Amino acid sequence: MLESARCAGMSSIHLELRASMNAAGALYRANGLLRNRSGARYYRSGEGRRKAPCGMLRVLRAPGPVPYTWRPPRTEDT
């Protein structure tokens, strides 16, 4: 996912997950994403209470125009 985002010229990755998803949060942190905010309470717990999501972010490059670096793959004439 990270490499695809870089190749596409994205400057950052943002995601949201339930704050109770500890294993998923650990996986994202291990891949360089940092917790940056909590959002509106739209997840529901088993008791019917609303829970806020955990927002995470990873910056891939400085914001601004994307340098044109992609080139189509070469094919050998046979």
Image (cartoon, rainbow, N blue to C red):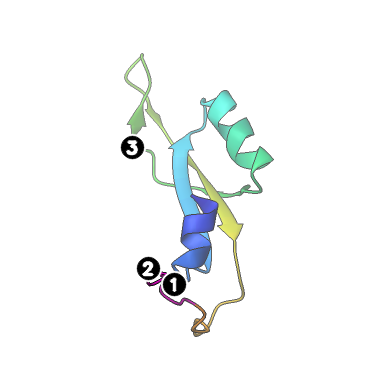
Amino acid carrying label 1: it is Arg
**Label 3, residues with CA under 10 Å away: few <14, some 14-19, many ≥20:** few
SS of the residue at dot 3? loop
Q: Is residue 50 above or below residue 74?
A: above
Amino acid carrying label 3: it is Tyr
Q: Is residue 59 above or below residue 69?
A: above
Q: Would you say the magenta stretch is mainly helix, strand or loop?
A: loop
Residue placed at 65% from the left, 40% from the top? Answer: 29
The answer to whether mark 1 and mark 3 are in CB contact below 8 A is no
Provide the residue designation for mark 1. Answer: 74
Residue placed at 36% from the left, 23% from the top? Answer: 49
Residue placed at 63% from the left, 32% from the top? Answer: 26
Amino acid carrying label 2: it is Thr
Image position of 10 (left or right of 49): right
Q: Which residues are magenta?
A: 70-78
Provide the residue designation for mark 2. Answer: 78
Which dot marks residue 42?
A: 3
